[in-house]
């Protein structure tokens, strides 16, 4: 097994996630795309951990999973608050701070 | 958990061609479902496609010999985070069924950025790692080694992480409650 087959799968998922973040209006869909990006990073960590025979990569993948759980909790709370205040979760409309 | 270990033992006994075929199937499923997720015009379908991607990634972890990460992926992502996202869909009263305006008008720029990043990353990965191979006698790193590492070397980051989770929990409640 080549190392690059895992890294390129991760890169593909990362780029699809970046496209999702840039192209979606719906706040929940943007959060899903961010989950995709975090997952692709985890594939990298686990693949390089297997490559080097070192368990540290797996430990950091677990840390990333925990941080992703915290991130999606806070992110959904913010999306809910935006929905409650504006009756819409179109993140393009949340531009109060725009100069 | 024992199913994961059994799958791993089966994988370590099979020859690498079979493992590569498994990987190819998982990779194609993951990429196609991810593309469907970012282009679907139904929020609930997008969430279900994300579920497919996450399951395929869990399979990739099993191939890489990371049993505990695969089990955590299934429990945390497929179990908890997906339910949270579906609750988000429900509480923001997304329409059931297809919607027409889920993409904004910059999506062509977004596609351009994604393709450009993919080109740059593939090129630099190819230059950087070429045909480096994973070690043939890949020893699966056991859950015991992972836990020794978490509660030994990485104890302080682990405690910081538990504090972060607590802060995020309280923060989410404070932000989302009605007063």
Image (cartoon, coloured by chain):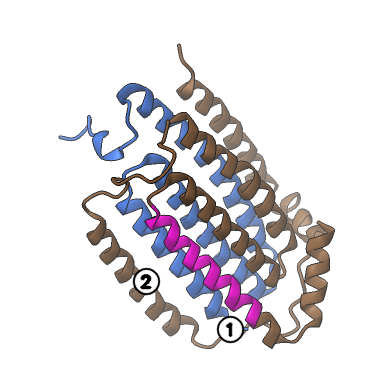
Chain colours: A blue, B brown
> To which residue does mark 2 refer?
B118
Q: Which residues are magenta?
A: B21-40
Q: Which mark is residue A2?
A: 1
Rounded to the nearest whole Å, what is the CA distance between mark 2 and mark 1? 19 Å
Nearest the eye: A12 or A57:
A12
Quadrant (top left/top right/bottom left/bottom right) for the N terminus of chain A:
bottom right
Residue B128 is left or right of residue A47, and the answer is: left
Location of residue B17 in the rendering, given as x and y in whole percent from the top left corner: 68, 87
Q: Tell me which corner region of the image, top left, top right, bottom left or bottom right, holds residue B165.
A: top right
Location of residue B170 in the rendering, given as x and y in whole percent from the top left corner: 56, 25
The vertical placement of A32 against B63, above or below, is: above
State the predominant SS element of the stretch in magenta: helix
Location of residue B104 in the rendering, given as x and y in whole percent from the top left corner: 25, 49
Estimate how packed mark 1 is, as few (under 14), some (14 to 19) or many (20 or more) residues with alpha carbons within 10 Å.
Answer: some
Residue at 57% x, 79% y: name it: A3
As helix, strand or loop, the secondary structure at mark 2 comes to helix
Q: Chain of mark 2?
A: B
Nearest the eye: B146 or B24:
B24
Q: Is residue B25 magenta?
A: yes
> Total number of numbered labels?
2
- In this view of the protein, can residue A74 be seen by the observer? no
Q: Chain of mark 1?
A: A
Q: Is residue B163 magenta?
A: no
Nearest the eye: A54 or A88:
A88
């Amino acid at each position: 097994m080549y190392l690059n087959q895992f890294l390129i799968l991760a890169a593909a998922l990362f780029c699809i996630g970046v496209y999702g973040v840039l192209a979606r209006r719906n706040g929940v869909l943007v959060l899903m795309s961010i989950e995709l990006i975090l997952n692709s990073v985890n594939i990298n960590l686990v693949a390089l951990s297997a490559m080097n025979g070192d368990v540290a990569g797996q430990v950091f993948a677990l840390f990333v999973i925990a941080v992703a759980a915290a991130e999606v909790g806070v992110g959904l709370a913010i999306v809910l608050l935006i929905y409650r205040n504006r009756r819409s979760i179109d993140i393009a409309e949340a531009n109060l701070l725009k100069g | 958990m024992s199913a994961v270990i059994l799958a791993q033992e089966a994988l370590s006994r099979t020859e690498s061609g079979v493992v590569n075929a498994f990987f190819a199937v998982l990779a194609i499923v993951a990429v196609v479902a991810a593309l469907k997720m970012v282009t679907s015009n139904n929020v609930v379908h997008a969430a279900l496609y994300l579920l497919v991607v996450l399951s395929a990634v869990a399979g990739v972890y099993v191939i890489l010999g990371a049993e505990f990460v695969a089990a955590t992926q299934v429990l945390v992502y497929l179990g908890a985070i997906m339910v949270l996202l579906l609750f988000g869909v429900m509480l923001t009263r997304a329409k059931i069924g297809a919607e027409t305006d889920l993409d904004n008008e910059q999506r062509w720029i977004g596609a351009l950025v994604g393709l450009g990043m993919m080109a740059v990353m593939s090129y630099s990965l190819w230059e950087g790692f070429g045909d480096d191979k994973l070690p043939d006698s890949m020893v699966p790193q056991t859950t015991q080694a992972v836990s020794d590492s978490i509660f030994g070397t990485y104890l302080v980051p682990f405690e910081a992480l538990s504090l972060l989770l607590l802060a995020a929990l309280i923060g989410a409640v404070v932000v989302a409650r009605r007063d």
